[in-house]
Amino acid sequence: MARKLEAIIADIQSNTHGEPSGTPNTPAQDLKEIKALHALACELISAQNWSTPHESDVSSEQLQAFSEWAKANSITSPKLVPKVAGSKGLGLFATENIEPTETILQVPLSAMMTASMSRHNLGKLVDAVPILQHMPSLALAVNLLRESLNPESFWAPYIHILPSAWIKLKLQPLTSLTSKYTDLAATCPCFATVVKDLKSNLRQYVIIREGLNKHKKIISLDQFTYRRFRWAVAVVMTRQNPIPNELGRPVFTLIPMYDLFNHAPGEVTTHYHGELKLSETASAGHFSAGDEVLIAYGHRPNRDLFVYSGFVDLDMQDNDSYRLWLGINPSDKYAKQKLSLLSSANLPVAGYYELRRNVKQTCVNILVFVQIFCLKAADFEGGSLDVSSIIECDETSPRYAAALRWLNARVQLLLSSFTSTLDAEDIAGVSTHRLNAVKMKIADKRLLQDVSVELDQALSAECVIDQ
C-alpha cells in the first residue's frame, strides 16, 4: 500500500508542476484536465483508506454543546439560535422579533481562530514549508485540520458543527468535481479557476506532506490524509473573513457563530472593532421570531460565490464580471508596436480582463486594449503613436467606434456559444451541483446580453460617428 501511495504522489507531482501556457485552455482541454486531476484525487483518497466520524448531520447534542461553548467564551447572540436550514446546512434563526440595525451578534477575538495564531501553532512546519508563510489561508486550514484531530481542542465544540464532506462542501467545485456537472461548468470562464484551484490543492498537499515527514509531531502522516486536507481547505474557503490586526492589515480568521449566517443580497452589516477586539453584526432588516436571519456576504461576483462558496445568487448580479481573454497575435504585422503601446499603458499584453456592465465607465482598460488591438497600418504612419492619445481618446472618434464594434462582435460570438435559452431551461429534478453550474451560465449570459445592449446603444448614439 505504501508503494502505491508513493506512486500516486509521484503522479500528482508530475501533473501539477510546471508553468501555465501563455494562452488559456479551451473548455474541452479544461474538462480533460479536471477529469485527470479528479481521478488522481480519488486514487489518493482510496489509497489512504480515509474515513471520518462525522459523515452525518450535526446532532442536536452537538448544537447544544456548541451553544454552551459560545456562551462560555463570551459570544453574545441573545436572539439567535443555530438550527438546520434545509439544504443550506446550518443557519441562525430568530428566537424573538429583531429590528433593523439591532445588534444581533458579538464575537470576541479570543474565540476566533486566526491565520496568525495558526502560523504560531504550526511552529517549525511553517519554517520548513514556505507556502505556509506566504499563504495565510493555507496555514489556517492546516491548523484547523490539526485542531480537528485533537478531542481536547479548545475549538472542539465549534469544529464538531462544521460541515464535513457532506451538504455545503459537496457543492463547492473543489470537493465535488464529478461527471454530474463538469460538462456544464467547463463552458463557464470561471471553470479555469476551478482547474487551477484543484491543481494547486493537490500540489500543496504533497508539499506540506513532505514537510510533515520531518515534523511528524505536528501532524502524523497517517492522519494527514488528502481528504482531511481538502476538507479543511474547503471549510476555510467558505468561512474565512478578514479582520484588521494592530497595524490595520487584514488577517484571515474563522469566526465561530458568525459563519453560520447564510446569505441574502444587501449591504454588509458586520464590523470589527479593533479597540474592543470584537466582531459585531447588526441586523440587515426586520426578522420575526422563527425566521432565519440572513446577512450579505459582501459585494462579491457570482463567480466567486460559485467557486468558493458553492452557490449562485441570480438576484445579486451588480458585481458580476465575465473573464474575457485578450491578447495580441504574434503573427500580427504590427505586434511589436502594439505590445509596446500596451506596455506604455501598463496593461497586460495577454490575459484575462474583467468585462462588466456599464462598459464605458467600468471597462476602460478593455477599451484601451481593443483600440490598440484594432490599430491599422495607417495609424502607424507618420511616426510613433502616443499611447496617451489612445487612453484619452474622444468617444466620437472613428478609433473608439471601431473598438466598440470589435468588442460587440466578440460579445455576440460568446453569446452564440450558449446552446440553449438557459433561462427557460427545465431544471426540475436537476441535482444541486448541476443547477449551480446552470445558474452560473445564466449569470454569464445575462451579463453578456446587457453588455451587448449597451454597446448597440453606444454605437447607434449620435455621439459616435461611424466613418
Image: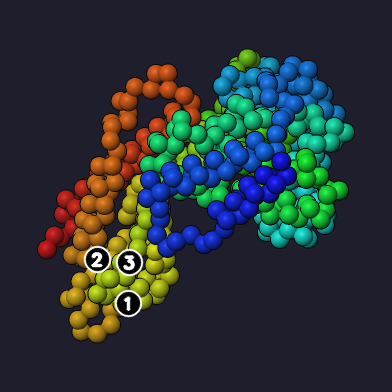
Looking at the image, tell me whether mark 2 or mark 3 is earlier in sequence order: 3
Labelled disc at residue 374? 2
Q: Secondary structure at mark 2?
A: loop
Q: Which mark is residue 336?
A: 1
**What is the spatial separation of the Cα atoms under label 1 and label 2, in whole angstroms?**
14 Å
Residues at marks 3 and 1 touching, judged by CB atoms closer than 8 Å: no
Left-right relation of 241 to 423: right
- The residues tagged by marks 2 and 3 sit, at their Cα atoms, a distance apart of 10 Å
Circle count? 3
Callout 2 touching callout 3 (CB < 8 Å): no
Q: Quadrant of residue 132?
A: bottom right
Tell me the crowding category of disc 2: few under 14, some 14 to 19, or many 20 or more residues within 10 angstroms, Cα based.
Answer: some
Residue found 81% across the figure and 22% down from its top = 65
Image quadrant containing the C terminus: bottom left
Question: Is any part of residue 77 visible from this angle?
Answer: no
Residue at 64 percent of width and 41 percent of height: 44
In the rendered image, residue 9, in percent from the top left (x then y), is placed at: 65, 49
Characterize the local packing of mark 3: few (<14), some (14-19) or many (20 or more) Cα atoms within 10 angstroms: many
Q: Position of residue 376 (x, y in %)?
A: 20, 71
- Quadrant for the N terminus, please: top right
Q: Is residue 270 above or below residue 132?
A: above
Task: Please state which amino acid type lies under the numbered disc 2.
Answer: Cys
Instruction: Point out the tag, 3 or 1, that comes first from the N-terminus.
Output: 3
Image location of residue 306, percent across then percent down: 50, 38
The amino acid marked with disc number 1 is Lys
Residue drawn at point x = 32 percent, y = 30 percent: 422
> Does residue 195 appear to the left or right of 216 in the view shown?
left
The residue beneath circle 3 is 328
| N-terminal label among 1 and 2 | 1
